[in-house]
Image (cartoon, helix red, strand yellow):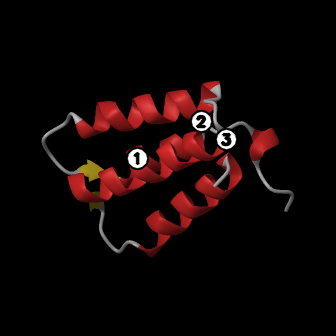
């Protein structure tokens, strides 16, 4: 999985969720996918590093995470990693 695929996957994951908040288990799933990008590429870009750090900060919260906070993470991936529309 590359950064572009991660962003598309994350957008779909959020869009398909009917919930207004994500629980810790859902956050772990998102973080595991972010780590898959790092494992696949063999390196970590600054944007993916920021995404993982943001996910870790959210994971340290004890309550459910508003989906808007997760959507903000999508803005951390540079435009040059986005597919052409």
Q: Position of residue 68 (x, y in %)?
A: 41, 50
Q: Looking at the rendering, which quadrant does residue 5 occupy?
A: bottom right
Q: Does 69 appear above or below 54? A: below
Q: Nearer the viewer, mark 2 or mark 1?
A: 1
**In the structure shown, which secondary structural element does the residue marked by tag 3 occupy?**
helix
Q: CA distance from mark 3 to mark 2?
A: 18 Å
Q: Position of residue 32 (x, y in %)?
A: 41, 50
Q: Earlier in the sequence, mark 1 or mark 3?
A: 1
Judge left or right: residue 34 versus residue 76: left
Q: Which residue is mark 2?
A: 76
Q: CA distance from mark 1 to mark 3?
A: 16 Å
Q: CA distance from mark 2 to mark 1?
A: 14 Å
Q: Considering the image in quadrants, where does the N terminus appear?
A: bottom right
Q: Earlier in the sequence, mark 2 or mark 1?
A: 1
Q: Which residue is mark 1?
A: 31
Residue in the image at 31% along x and 51% along y:
28
Q: Position of residue 64 (x, y in %)?
A: 20, 51
Judge left or right: residue 6 versus residue 18: right
């Amino acid at each position: 999985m590359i950064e572009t695929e991660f962003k598309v996957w994350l957008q779909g994951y959020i869009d398909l969720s009917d919930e207004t908040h994500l629980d810790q288990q859902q956050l772990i799933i998102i973080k595991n996918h972010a780590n898959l990008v790092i494992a696949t590429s063999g390196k970590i870009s600054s944007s993916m590093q920021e995404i993982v750090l943001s996910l870790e900060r959210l994971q340290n919260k004890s309550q459910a995470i508003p989906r808007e906070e997760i959507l903000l993470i999508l803005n951390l991936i540079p435009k040059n990693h986005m597919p052409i529309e």
